[in-house]
Amino acid sequence: MSSIVLEARDIRYRYPRGQEAIKGISFHFRRGEKIALVGPNGAGKSTLLQMFNGMIRPDSGTMLFDNKPMEYDRASLRELRRKVGFVLQNPDRQIIAPTVYQDVGFGPVNLGCDEATVKEAVTTALRHVGLSGFERRPPHHLSGGEKKRVAIAGVLAMDPDVLVFDEPTSGLDPSGSEDLMELLDELNHEGKTIVISTHDVELAYPWADRAILLAAGRIIKEDVPDVAFGNTKFVRMAHLSVPTLLELSAELEKRGFAIPDRKPRSVLDMVHIIESQARGSCCHPAPGTITVCDVDILAAGAVPPWVHARPGLAVGAMGTRAKQCAATGQVALEFTYGVIDKCILRALRGKDSLILTNGSMVGRVAERVEAYCRESGNRIHVVEMSEEDPLV
Amino acid sequence: MFEELLEDVAQTNGLRETSTWLKLAAGLSAIVLCLLSTGYAAPLFIAVILSATILVLARVDIRTYAELFLIPLWFALMSVAVIVLISGGEHVYWSWDPLSFLSLSITRESINYGFFVLCRVVGGMSALLFIALTTPMTDLFVVMRKVRVPDFVIDLAMIIYRTIFFLLDQVRQVYHAQVMRLGYSGWKESVHTFSMLCGSAFIASWDAGDDLVRAMDARCYDGKFALLGENRPVELRPLAALALFLVATSAAVVATQGMTLL
């Protein structure tokens, strides 16, 4: 098992002249985990998050980073804050400089990097969040989703090990939220530990590796999401609701459906359960193929003719750059979020699909499909699109 | 109450990608030439050329530009009227002495002088608007750094710049909330509501300051703020255009020395 990166040992915190906000909490996060801190408003989520990078010092108990107790002197705090990036709920409060370039470069400059290094860090961070070319824009000219991405880029520019997000999707529209969760997945895939706080159970349930339910400054339950969210007693204590998929599977179980030990985490899982019991198999005799196209490698002009030569093909895009590529090539996108699952669902119906994406996400498609095939016993082919592909 | 901001126009204008140095040089030298000119023609020439540049090259909406221009023009016209009436001269067209110590007259000299002042104002205005509409503040910070303005001044300016827009947004929200609940329905209510607006703006700015410090701390603030991007390089065509403009205007200043209207 991978090593522990953040740990809390019986921490307590009381606001000056206020109530006790954190009443004895212990937990640990492992490297590369996706953690969701879930709880109602006022449960102490934000307070707890601010302890992760030393913004708030607990009154008692110890916070550990990399198995070393946190120190609260200036130099240690700087080092800690470089390694634990914090993205505030309101990006307006986080963006401090007058242009995107200056804001994203703020961290690296204060870490003492020279100009060339800063420039490289900023360019990489902006490309990561899909905002290349926004360098000279002032933040007040950006949309809410773009501001959020600038705030994230500002943290990414310092190359932290752990990323902490306070309510990452608040104020974003549903498709913006999906985009953002996809970005978090991508970052996690690159090895970063990600912690989010939220009260959106539907969002946290399929995403997290582990969920921590908080209420009134205490941890109610800490477990994998299907256990943590599956217990109605805990969920009610935390003023939350049971995710629809879990509720549905519980109802189906009561009606005699055999639900596997691993509860359904997505529509795909649910379809699998229902179809394999109703029809014996959920797979078309000749399943469709999923073609993956790396928009960084393939020439931009190659995609539209390829798509037009194949009527009945559905196109999905993962990541901002793939979406931009589709927009410039005027390729109509059927799926813009949850793309892999939706393409698997299509393949199960015997239909083909194309996924536009880039970088490390290309490998993720194959991994996800392979994991699904292993679990379900179905066979779906993933092909990488190359220049030599015949047009018809 | 909240119209389009000058800065928004500047951020999207057609000359955004031209070197800041060239734009500043054009605007500032136009102002100097306006002041050096002794005839009315050269400032008018500057006004026409720069207005055409603002409208055609920078693609600023003509109504926006006209509105911006008219506000100071009213003040200028009123001042010019006073100048014409009280400055006196030899060729008197009309005069009136309503009081023993006050005599009003319109003379050929006073009309010439008034018109000259008006042309200077128009020329200077267009030069100022040229800078304001084509050069966003964010580009000026880079210039400030290059001309060795102390870092703390730039830091402050940058924080103020960022905060202005944030606060404006807050004030806008509070204002709308007040209007929706009929806060400005009468004179007495208006005073009361406006005082509440000021109060909440103060609290919002206080909060914003707190948050700024926290946000900076969270990102390893170490006394360095004034990171700046790069300005666009000086390109040949704009440089040639600027040179042509300066030569033509200087020639106009010399050629129309002492030119008067009447």
Image (cartoon, coloured by chain):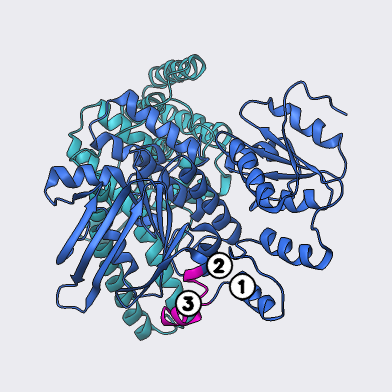
Chain colours: A blue, B cyan
Residue B83: image location, x then y, percent: 32, 47
Q: Which of B64 and B249 lies nearest the eye of the viewer? A: B64
Quarter in which the C terminus of chain A is drawn: top right
Q: Chain of mark 3?
A: A
| Image mark count | 3
Relative placement, left or right, of B230 versus A47 is right
**Is A233 colored magenta in this rendering?**
yes
Q: Amino acid at mark 3?
A: Leu
For the residues labelled 3 and 2, say whether their Cβ atoms are less than 8 Å apart: no
For the residues labelled 2 and 1, say whether their Cβ atoms are less than 8 Å apart: yes
Q: Is residue B222 in view from this perspective?
A: yes
Residue B216: image location, x then y, percent: 25, 49
Per the image, the residue denoted by label 3 is: A240
Per the image, the residue denoted by label 1 is: A244
Q: Quadrant of residue A88?
A: bottom left
Relative placement, left or right, of B155 versus B64 is left
Whether residue B199 is situated above or below residue A172 in the rendered picture: below
Per the image, the residue denoted by label 2 is: A202
